[in-house]
Image (tube, rainbow, N blue to C red):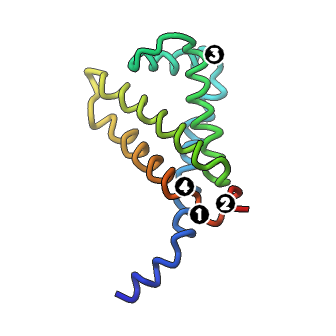
Amino acid sequence: MAIFDTLGKYRNTGLLIIRLGLGAMMMVHGFPKLTGGPVVWEELGGSMKLVHIDFFPVFWGFMAAVAEGIGGLFLILGLFFRPTNILLFFTMVIAALVHLTNAKEGISEASHAIELGVVFLGLTLLGPGKYSVDKK
């Protein structure tokens, strides 16, 4: 249909809208973790035990906080787009595993992290679109 052909011309605008929305929400989730300090980072990083990484939990927690907080800003800007999305994808994999291995939670609690992981993986393949710092 002609209307859908016309809408296809707005691919870059659509990517920008996705980047702005997801980036803002990742910043909302990530900045409290980023500013939480070593106690919060150690708790976050302790989740890496699920993939048999039980060393340097403070480092891993800090990296997860950076991926969400600073990664959200990078999503908005379209800066370091593919590496940022890969880091966010892996962060969501760990978040999903945390929920899936918790006996009180399960798939309904993990679904948000799984959905975001799928989006971040897809964005890695699509790229940022033409309205991004990476394209300038």
Q: Which residue is mark 3?
A: 38
Q: Quadrant of the C terminus?
A: bottom right
User: Which label's residue is closer to the chain start, 4 or 1?
Assistant: 4
- Residues at circles 2 and 4 in contact by the CB criterion of under 8 Å: no
Residue in view at x 66 percent, y 27 percent? 35
Amino acid type at image mark 2: Ser
Q: Check disc 4 and report its element: helix, strand or loop.
A: helix
CA–CA distance in space, label 4 to label 3: 28 Å
Whether label 2 touches label 1, CB < 8 Å: yes
Can you identify the residue that label 2 sits on?
A: 132
The disc, 2 or 4, on the residue closer to the chain's N-terminal end is 4
Q: Give the mark nearer the N terminus: 3 vs 1.
A: 3
Residue 11 versus residue 95 in the image, above or below? below
> Residue at horizontal 51%, vertical 70%?
11
| Circle nearer the viewer, 3 or 1 | 1
Query: Which SS class for mark 3?
Result: helix
Spatial CA distance of label 3 from label 2 is 33 Å
The residue under label 1 is 129
Instruction: Spot the residue most to the front.
Output: 125
- Identity, as a three-letter code, of the amino acid under mark 1: Gly
Q: Quadrant of residue 97?
A: top left
User: For the residues marked 2 and 1, what is the alpha-carbon distance in whole angstroms?
Assistant: 6 Å
Q: Residue at x 40, y 86 (%)?
A: 3
Q: Nearer the viewer, mark 2 or mark 4?
A: 2
Would you name the residue on which mark 4 appears? 21
Query: Residues under labels 2 and 4: Cα distance?
Result: 14 Å
Q: What percent of the width, then of the height, locates residue 24?
A: 59, 49
Q: Please give the name of the residue rendered at 63% of the width and 66% of the height, measured from the top-left corner.
A: 130
For the residues labelled 3 and 1, the Cα–Cα distance comes to: 36 Å
